[in-house]
Amino acid sequence: MTVPRLVEQFELGLDAPICLTWELTYACNLACVHCLSSSGRRDPRELTTAECKDVIDTLQRMQVFYVNIGGGEPTVRPDFWELVDYATAHQVGVKFSTNGIKVDAGAALRLAASDYVDVQISLDGATAEVNDAVRGAGSYATAVRAMDNLKAAGFAGFKVSVVMTRHNIGQLDQLKALADSYGAQLRLTRLRPSGRGADTWHQLHPEAGQQRQLYDWLASRGEQVLTGDSFFHLAPYGGPLPGLNLCGAGRVVCLIDPVGDVYACPFAIHEEFLAGSVRQAGGFEAVWRDSALFAELRRPAARGEGEAGGACRSCEFFDSCRGGCMAAKFFTGLPLDGPDPECVRGYGAEALKAADPVTAPRPALDHSHRSAPVPVMIGPRPGGPPGRACDENPLAGFAAAASRSR
Amino acid sequence: MSTDARGSGPAPRFDLDRAWCVDDRVAVRPEPFGALLYHFGTRRLSFLKNTTVLAVVRSLADHPSARSACAAAGVRAAALPAYERALATLAESRMIRERPVS
């Protein structure tokens, strides 16, 4: 009996996703500098409660096992709990990511009572200082309060979800200890240059030595620490980490955004990766089965995975990293059939030098808060050489007034 | 893509001559290559790599033993150890559980 390897089956796509990410709203109380969906303000075209329930009915019919609900901050939708209950009553499991703002004692009790709902508290540092620099003032305290409530309610095994940056890789042991103290499980994921992350990735992504440190730390923890299978680009350091080691975009996963648009993956909100809308005839099922984009993504040659593939195909490590992350390449201006910008062999760093950041594709949507601008750091890094007095923009004091008058 | 799973306690030992069934919290989704299994409690994903093992798993509850389910699905003696290993892996991840016989 010859059965193709599962990875090969998955590269060709499945009749239905295994799971998918569903951003329920672009509204968010925070303004994280790396937000993958540039969230902040609610989109007035957001799917209605009835439309969301239709999507859940479709997912049940297709036997999609679970949805990863995110946003934005999904819990600020007034019908959030109604939708969670509807999904679990229809055999669609729910994992949702939250900054913890609505996880009070009552919500925690409710969550602890269900087998079919899992919670991921987002926290990007083991200390308020490191976390709040990325997620905003007070966000560490909000997350800790939510975790206290979950622990008090007896919710064992919720997830503490951390996006790895050059500022928190030094806190790996502290992060693990923090999760352990709550009986929670640590989940580490990769920073992508998506959404507002397109502007901050270059300052936040782990440095080469830190990537090695992260890999070794993960490899020694095995299945104790979850990764959302997001670090397969590190496999050439010494073999695959637990989980699926391939890009599942449009093949086994995808994204439904708050207005019902379907993208290949949550890190690829851009018209190039827009497959359709759940609002079109045939709904989500038709998009998954018939979209021309997904058909293309299921053709290995298009990803440089075919026999005659791209720059990476001849690399001896191709079978372990599969060319890395499509979204990471796209938003840093690299070709999709070439190396990942964080290729552990250094080919990505070389390619980045040649890429023009000005012509790199920009994330398509921006729901960022207008009133509270995201503190994107430009110019010299803190601690660098002091600027000259004449570098000060003579119009600095007038910028706010000028933008308000538009 | 994520196959994140919740940790679990000590795994039960698999015995081919006992009665088994798919856990109530497991969804089985047939696929061209076999099937995908998802456990809502452990949040773990598993794969059945051919349609014969799918037939075995689906019929476990109707047989007095896993050995009998294998035989009914046409598993020959030479192939039995491979199927035993596959079922043991499923028992370890709690996709199947031992069933009390009356």
Image: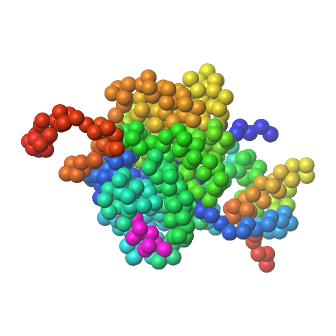
Residue, far right: B77
Compared with A294, B23 (above or below) is below
On the image, the x and y values in percent for residue A262 come to 41, 43
Q: Quadrant of residue A397?
A: top left
Residue A245, magenta (yes or no): no
Visual colour scheme: rainbow
On the image, the x and y values in percent for residue B21 come to 73, 66
Identity of the residue drawn at 67% across and 41% down: A238
The quadrant of the picture occupied by the C terminus of chain A is top left
Magenta span: chief secondary structure: helix
Identity of the residue drawn at 50% across and 26% down: A350
Q: Is residue A11 visible?
A: no
Span of residues in magenta: A142-151
Identity of the residue drawn at 52% across and 61% down: A174
Residue A145, magenta (yes or no): yes
On the image, the x and y values in percent for residue A296 come to 51, 30
Identity of the residue drawn at 75% across and 57% down: B89
Q: Quadrant of residue A200?
A: top left
Front position in the image: B56 or A229 = A229
Front position in the image: A92 or A134 = A134
Front position in the image: A272 or A219 = A219
On the image, the x and y values in percent for residue A359 come to 35, 26
Q: Is residue A304 visible?
A: yes
Compared with A55, A307 (above or below) is above
Relative to residue A276, is residue A348 drawn left or right?
A: right
Relative to residue A398, is residue A197 drawn left or right?
A: right
Relative to residue A264, is residue A32 drawn left or right?
A: left
The quadrant of the picture occupied by the N terminus of chain A is top right
